Image: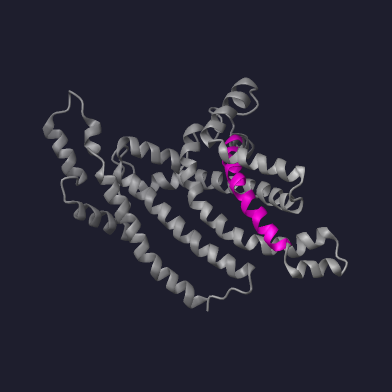
Amino acid sequence: MGTYFVRRIFIAIPVFFGITVLSFLIMNMAPGNPVDMLINPNIPKELLELKREKFGLNDPLYMQYANWLGGVVRGDLGYSFSSYAPVSRLIGERIVPTLLLASASLLFGLLIAIPVGVISAVKQNSKLDYFLTGMTFLGISIPPFFLGLGLIYVVGIQWRWLPTGGMTTLGGAGGAGDVILHMIMPVTVLGAAIAGKKVRYVRASMLEVLGQDYLRTARMKGLREFAVTSRHALRNALIPVIAVVGAEIPLLLGGSIVIEQVFQWPGIGQLTMEAILSRDYPTLMGVNLVAACVVLLTNLITDMLYAAVDPRISYG
């Protein structure tokens, strides 16, 4: 297994550089530059040109990328064009709220998807199966931002049960309880989107496993249906679901951009939108760097979990 993962790491290095190069090129294909955001009647053209020179925007693209990559190798992600703060500090302040929101949403979604998918498979073609399948399609069909705005209006404004945005109450004492209250609605929205997609995979995987011969043998030996389903069927059914969940994590970070804007959650998603609107190239490249690392690390961890769950898989 060690040799396999060493090979994967060597493969990940050129993939990583490819992601950063494409991100840099796409970012610079947009018309204008960050200095254009400073234009107003009181700023002379000479000062704008000095700003371009200071930011290195007059250098060729390959030199700008080389300078950025050299800083990354030294552990320096540069400085924000808009706030002049170190990009590493900005990302460090925002990554924890995003990871907290994403992990809680993933856990919430799986806690719904796995039992609902199992019940739907065990009760195949029953009224309960049709009801759960219908609710699944409903969860997939509703856009997360629409559901989020609906919850804000009904639960936050009309009923006043939960705070409508932010991570803590302004002027409040804060604490874990306050953070949890602010997390309920965004976690519900993201978790519902995850559950809606994962129920189908769990159900399909369970239906395939439930028809296997070894489960018929277990039933003939007198095992109860609950034991057959929970002990023997569920573990094997979850093996292909692991890959799907692994692929969901990068998408979850991307989806949190919209949800963080809706709920004003102070995470990477909100930082990304601020950087896009101000054309803050160093911050955008820093966020893309973190996203690339998350994708590559997630794929590696998924392979390790595959090997741990399924003894038939060997990475020798």
Closer to the camera in the image, 309 or 228: 228
Q: Which residue is depicted at the point 66% across and 39% down? A: 135
What segment is highlighted magenta in the picture?
Answer: 185-210
Q: Which residue is depicted at the point 44% across and 48% down? A: 92
267 left or right of 157?
A: left
Closer to the camera in the image, 110 or 289: 110
Q: Residue 63: x, y in percent? A: 19, 55
Reply above or below: 4 against 254.
below
Q: Tell which residue pokes out farthest to the left in this image.
A: 46
Q: Which residue is depicted at the point 49% across and 49% down? A: 251
Main SS of the magenta part reads helix
Q: Residue 20: x, y in percent? A: 33, 55
The number of numbered discs placed on residues in the rendered structure image is 0
Would you identify the image quadrant in which residue 105 lies? top right
192 left or right of 292?
A: right
Q: Is residue 178 highlighted in magenta?
A: no
Q: Tell which residue pokes out farthest to the top in this image.
A: 158
Reply above or below: 246 against 131.
below
Q: Residue 36: x, y in percent? A: 22, 34
| Colour scheme shown | one colour
Q: Is residue 86 visible?
A: no
Q: Residue 220: x, y in percent? A: 85, 68
Q: Which residue is depicted at the point 68% across and 52% down? A: 114
Reply above or below: 210 against 95.
below
Q: Tell which residue pokes out farthest to the front in this image.
A: 125
Q: Is residue 58 visible?
A: yes
